[in-house]
Amino acid sequence: MAPQPTAPLASVLFVCVHNAGRSQMAAGFLTHLAGDRVEVSSAGSLPADQVNPAAVEAMAEAGIDISTELPKLLTTEAVKASDYVITMGCGDACPVFPGRTYLDWALEDPAGQGVEAVRPIRDEIRTRVEALIAAIDAEREA
């Protein structure tokens, strides 16, 4: 008998203004590192037309392809459907609902910067995503 698929441990929504850099990199790392254990989405309060090419290049250097991602508009439904909402500079544009865990990651905005400037932002995001996975795992084990 084939093993039954398990439901994700948690759902995580990453939000930044344009959904073109920080939130896309975070979603890429979480998807890559947690696999199907966590449901991942991202959105922006004022989404851009495309993902930041420097973010795409920086993530490709880390072995993660986000080149086919498209910026998405933040919706109330997306927030309601998420256990964790992680904001990155969206300010008051992010709706707040009880029963969710909200984290604000103060990260430099990679908009308009070259890949050299984006690499340290990417690396900081990876560190924070790894800590988030550890926290989600610990919470589920408790």
Image (cartoon, rainbow, N blue to C red):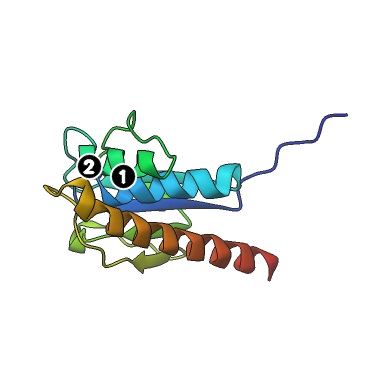
Q: Specify the label residue 54 is tagged with.
A: 2
Q: From this viewpoint, is residue 39 visible?
A: no
Mark 1 → mark 2, Cα distance in angstroms: 6 Å
Q: Splitting the image into 4 quarters, where does residue 133 fall?
A: bottom right
- Disc 1: which residue: 58
Relative side of 27 to 53, left or right: right
User: Most extreme residue toward the left, as rendered?
Assistant: 112
Local crowd size for mark 1, using a 10 Å CA cut-off: few (<14), some (14–19), many (≥20)? many
Question: Residue 111: percent from the left, percent from the top?
Answer: 15, 49
Relative side of 14 to 51, left or right: right
Relative side of 117 to 24, left or right: left
Q: Nearer the viewer, residue 127 or 77?
A: 127
Q: Residue at x 31, y 66 (%)?
A: 105
Q: Residue at x 42, y 57 (%)?
A: 126
Question: Residue 76: percent from the left, percent from the top?
Answer: 31, 48
Q: Secondary structure at mark 1?
A: helix
Question: Residue 28: percent from the left, percent from the top?
Answer: 41, 44
Q: Nearer the viewer, residue 133 or 75?
A: 133
Q: Quadrant of the C terminus?
A: bottom right
Local crowd size for mark 2, using a 10 Å CA cut-off: few (<14), some (14–19), many (≥20)? many
Q: Nearer the viewer, residue 22 or 55?
A: 55
Q: Residue at x 63, y 68 (%)?
A: 138
Given contact means CB atoms under 8 Å apart, are the residues at marks 1 and 2 in contact?
Answer: yes
Q: Is residue 54 above or below residue 93?
A: above
Kind of residue at badge 1: Ala
User: Most extreme residue toward the bottom, as rendered?
Assistant: 142
Q: From this viewpoint, is residue 13 visible?
A: yes
Question: Residue 61: percent from the left, percent from the top?
Answer: 37, 42
Q: Secondary structure at mark 2?
A: helix
Q: Is residue 136 above or below residue 119?
A: below
